[in-house]
Image (cartoon, coloured by chain):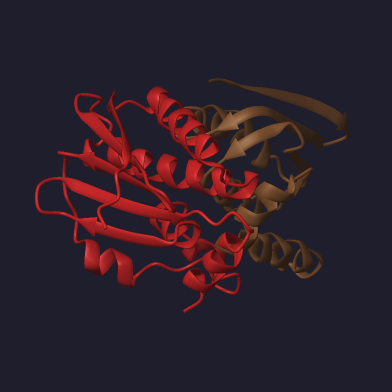
Amino acid sequence: MNISIEREVKGDNLYLVAVEGEIDVFTAPELKKGLLPLTEIHGGNLTLDLNATKYMDSTALGVIVAALKSASKHQCRFSVTGMTPRIKRLFEITGLSDLLNRAQTSEGNADD
Amino acid sequence: MTETKDVIRLTLPAKPEFVSVARLASSGAASRMGYSFDAIEDIKVAVSEACTNAVSHGYKQMETGQIKIVMECGENALTITVIHNGESFDASQALQKLKPIDPYADLDEVNEGGLGLFLINALMDQVTISTECGVAVRMIKFLSRDGVERIANKVSTTE
């Protein structure tokens, strides 16, 4: 079981990472490797597209939390898009949806 | 009174690349028993989480141990037990600490791990963990052909 990670430059500091396949304990490190460096671009804008992600579990949620933390530290905008109802459910049960929403709404008034 | 159960036993190397095999097997058993799409997905995540914990914590990614998975296909329930003989943990303390992410917590305080057991507990109807020798996570998902299982699941996740 593998994942394929597509990194696309959409414009000035605008990046899209699309993941196809299943994200679990085996493939999550690969996602982390592909995603985290892009969260370190100061003033960047990064979107994770899960439209083609067939499965994920807490290992993927952990990578997303790590990405969110790193993005916030580097003042990079990070968002997640294309969640299937199934994946959305995992985001909601674990509280990750709320965390992502809060991070996005507080973005405008980040101070440092 | 005695219910005969069909039992599937699976032994996997405690390596990350085999967790997907446990997922495939459990989804096969669940779909064979007639679970809904959502219930099958719940079972897959729960089994995956238990195996992930065995690989990452039980054997500390040493890739030397084994994971035993026992799936009991009953009349009204699928019981899956994920067993490993690696390092144990304080299950009652861990179960007490289960909680979702606090969206209002300082981002630095939000943990990247620790959601596995929380998800198992939220997605399955009954969960018991025994830590006498290694760890055995026993998870039950009830089968309800009229779709009541979704409601049953909700009840079990409400505190």
- Would residue A110 be found to the left or right of residue A56 on screen? right
> Would residue B70 be seen by someone viewing this image from the given angle?
yes
Residue B152, percent from left and from top: 53, 67
**Colour chain B is painted in:** red
Q: List the single residue furthest toward the left.
A: B133
Q: Which chain is brown?
A: A
Question: In the figure, A109 relative to A23: above or below?
Answer: below
Q: Residue at x 53, y 64 (%)?
A: B153
Q: Nearer the viewer, residue A69 or A83?
A: A83
Q: Residue at x 68, y 36 (%)?
A: A38
Which quadrant, please, contains the N terminus of chain B?
A: bottom left
- Would residue A103 be found to the left or right of residue B1 on screen? right
Total numbered badges shown on the rendered structure? 0
- Would residue B48 be found to the left or right of residue A1 on screen? left
Question: In the figure, B79 relative to B156: above or below?
Answer: above
Residue A21: image quadrant is top right
Q: List the single residue furthest toward the right.
A: A11
Q: Residue at x 14, y 45 (%)?
A: B134
Residue B137, percent from left and from top: 28, 50
Q: Residue at x 28, y 40 (%)?
A: B54
Question: In the figure, B67 relative to A44: above or below?
Answer: above
